[in-house]
Amino acid sequence: MANLREAYAATALASLEMDAERERAVDRVAAAGRAPRLGMDIWRARYQLEGKSYQDALNGLLAHFRARYGAETREMSQRVVDQAFHEFMSDRCKDCNGARELMAGELRVICQTCEGYGVRRYTDFERARAMQLSMQRVKSLTHKLNWLLGEIQSMDNQVNTIISAELER
């Protein structure tokens, strides 16, 4: 399956002319029309850096989270959604920026921070500080935060799958 995230993001600046011979930006836009709204808001926020889509994604994720965890207060739900979306949007290692390796002259060194995975792992301390909560409360919310992160990643993958199928890739 093709990774269409960058190709779709480029449609924001592309001509929407049609071409029967090859895939154009308009084809990707039309294919995206088949994807769920929340998934597309997530895509537009992350890959096209659209401010309105960022807010729309947060609102949609809040509704999605509250449908599953209705017993949480609205304020606590908002904190979890904000943190989960922040972690999704800023998921690259802060030292290697997702490259997995660092170059020291001719020598390639595996990043010590992410151990070569390229992914940033947020600690409970970072989460507590960002969410302005106690460590104990953050630890009690970890499973809900991880569930939401999984849902966001699933929505991201679903959009990619739908657009790939529509473009017959």
Image (spheres, rainbow, N blue to C red):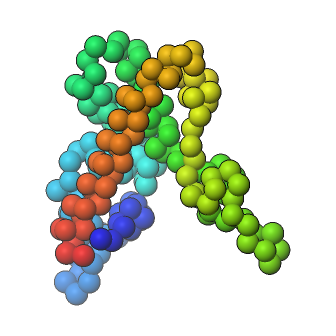
- The residue sitting at 36% across, 48% down in the picture is 153
The quadrant of the image that shows the N terminus is bottom left
| Location of residue 15 in the rendering, given as x and y in whole percent from the top left corner | 35, 70
Q: Is residue 167 left or right of residue 42?
A: left
- Which residue occupies the extreme bottom position in the image? 21
Q: Which of 29 and 42 is in front in this view?
A: 42
- The residue sitting at 41% across, 46% down in the picture is 45
- Whether residue 82 is visible to the viewer of this picture, yes or no, is no
In this picture, is 67 found above or below 32? above
Label total for image: 0
Q: Quadrant of residue 97?
A: bottom right
In this picture, is 78 found above or below 50? above
Q: In which quarter of the image is residue 61?
A: top left
| Location of residue 143 in the rendering, given as x and y in whole percent from the top left corner | 40, 30
Q: Nearer the viewer, residue 117 or 86?
A: 117
Q: Which of 12 and 28 is in front in this view?
A: 28
- Whether residue 139 is visible to the viewer of this picture, yes or no, is yes
- The residue sitting at 18% across, 68% down in the picture is 166
Q: Quadrant of residue 130?
A: top right
| Location of residue 30 in the rendering, given as x and y in whole percent from the top left corner | 20, 63
Q: Is residue 116 left or right of residue 39?
A: right
| Location of residue 85 in the rendering, given as x and y in whole percent from the top left corner | 44, 37
The quadrant of the image that shows the C terminus is bottom left
In this picture, is 29 found above or below 50? below
- The residue sitting at 21% across, 72% down in the picture is 167
